[in-house]
Amino acid sequence: MIPVKDTYIAACSLTPFIGKGHPDFIWKKHPDFGTKENLDLEGYLKLALTDLFGQGFDPKLVTRGYVGNFAGELFNKQGHLGALVPRVMPELAGVGVGRTEAACASGGIALMSAAEAICAGHDVVLVAGAECQTTVSAREGGEYLARAAHFQDERPIDDFTFPALFARRIKAYHEKYGLPLSDLAHFTMKAMENARKNPLAHMKANKWTFEAAAEGGDHNPQFLGNQELKDYLKVSDCSQVTDGGAALLLCSEEGLKKLGVDKSKAVKLRSYHLATNALGQTEDLTRMDTAGLAFCKTFNDGNVKVDDINVAEVHDCFTIAELLMMEAMGLEEPGKGVEAVKSGKTKLDGSLPVNTGGGLVGFGHPVGATGVKQAAEIYRQMKGLCGDYQIKSQPSLGVMANMGGDDRTCFTALFENMG
Ligand code: CAA
């Protein structure tokens, strides 16, 4: 799709992404345990919106809003999140705000809905995303997240359903192409090294080494119960169970004027695509065909080739997902996805830096916020706001790919720096 009205990101905000292993995450061995509590879902939404409008924008200019969230009812006993927005930002009372849900692509769908609201006539639209998942153990959360798979058919695979679905992909890819399992540690290390440079990242204090990430063991558990898949996935291959929020303002050219943002300070949404395929019916485990279709349409509509892109945010819910995304976007041939990172191409100083703030493995994965964060990260790289992980040459074109389920939904968007 090409937006029929020019559509821009005018501003964005990101909360810290926090969970187990983050120095500020409150748990029973934290010195503040008992006196301080972790933020809840409402707290993250409030923080993201307060920071966004605190940059000097009048909330009264917003006429529509969308909040991406996957499972507030389960993790937080809270649904109806559109109406949570005016609770945390009273100036937005009366504005129409809805929630979007497409599993881990919930944030991407919020962005898409906002873009389509601009084309329908709105000038300033709020896009937010939040998820707070640390209210339960990773095993219990595994059951909640399994609702993003086909629950009846795929839940029995393992208590940790999504880790098992991607272990199944690692196994299939390993059997087809002979990829050494230790090679996936190249993706882990890129994510962890980038996260160390990112003060907002869940894994900012990580001490992973390549050697530790390459081998399973007590330091890097192969934690699946499914005996056929257990050897194929280590903790270091997984994204994090993270709490966090993100927000941005999407607007028309008229909206930019109302907000007082010069076009040169904005990022244009040049093209986008949403693709969906049947739950529980992945045809080829060694490919991400839904993502491939979404990239292809977005690149065609945006009139670009993969070599034109300067920065990318892709959905690395597991290391194998980033590898397959590299193939789906056409950066590497099928079977050669690992070369993207091994060659240095996708590192911060490479020709196409990917997941510069650490991605879902390093920055963290507060499910409903992830797609909004991806767009925000491209904006931040284009505007030189990424501090120690800022890439050297200012990107002109950036792409994001936000996936729901096991490549069942994929939202891709191409952005252009206006100045
Ligand atoms: N050997 C075997 N098992 C071990 C072990 C060892 N040496 N050491 C620990 N374990 C077991 C533990 O027993 C534990 O299970 P229980 O405590 O419940 O019995 C299990 O491994 C996990 O250990 P922890 O709970 O201590 O680990 P953690 O809290 O650090 O979590 C993780 C690690 C399980 C990998 C967790 O980070 C995780 O679940 N990550 C993935 C999150 C996820 O799936 N997100 C969704 C991605 S999919 C997507 O993006 C698309 C979509 O639409 C959903």
Image: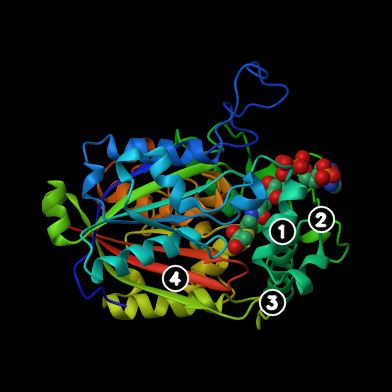
Residue 119 placement (x, y as % from top left): 24, 71
Q: Residue furthest front?
A: 94
Q: Is residue 296 visible?
A: yes
User: Horizontally, is 279 left or right of 288 in the view?
Assistant: right
Q: Earlier in the sequence, mark 2 or mark 4?
A: 2
Residues under numbered marks 2 and 4 in contact, where contact means CB atoms less than 8 Å apart: no
Question: Which amino acid does the dot numbered 3 rest on?
Answer: Gly
Q: Earlier in the sequence, mark 4 or mark 3?
A: 3
Are there few (<14), some (14-19), or many (20+) residues within 10 Å of tag 3?
some
Residue 30 placement (x, y as % from top left): 67, 21
Q: Earlier in the sequence, mark 4 or mark 1?
A: 1
* Label 1 secondary element: helix
* Label 4 secondary element: loop
Residues under numbered marks 2 and 3 in contact, where contact means CB atoms less than 8 Å apart: no
Question: Which amino acid does the dot numbered 1 rest on?
Answer: Pro
Residue drawn at the location 74% of the way across and 74% of the way down: 175
User: Residue under circle 3?
Assistant: 280
Dividing the picture into quarters, in which one does residue 147 lie?
A: bottom right
Residue drawn at the location 66% of the way across and 51% of the way down: 74
Q: CA distance from mark 4 to mark 3?
A: 27 Å
User: Residue under circle 2?
Assistant: 224
User: Horizontally, is 317 left or right of 164 in the view?
Assistant: left
Mark 2 or 4: in front is 2
Q: CA distance from mark 2 to mark 4?
A: 31 Å
Q: Is residue 217 visible?
A: no
Mark 4 or 3: in front is 3
Residue drawn at the location 21% of the way across and 41% of the way down: 58
Question: Which amino acid does the dot numbered 4 rest on?
Answer: Leu
Residues under numbered marks 1 and 2 in contact, where contact means CB atoms less than 8 Å apart: yes
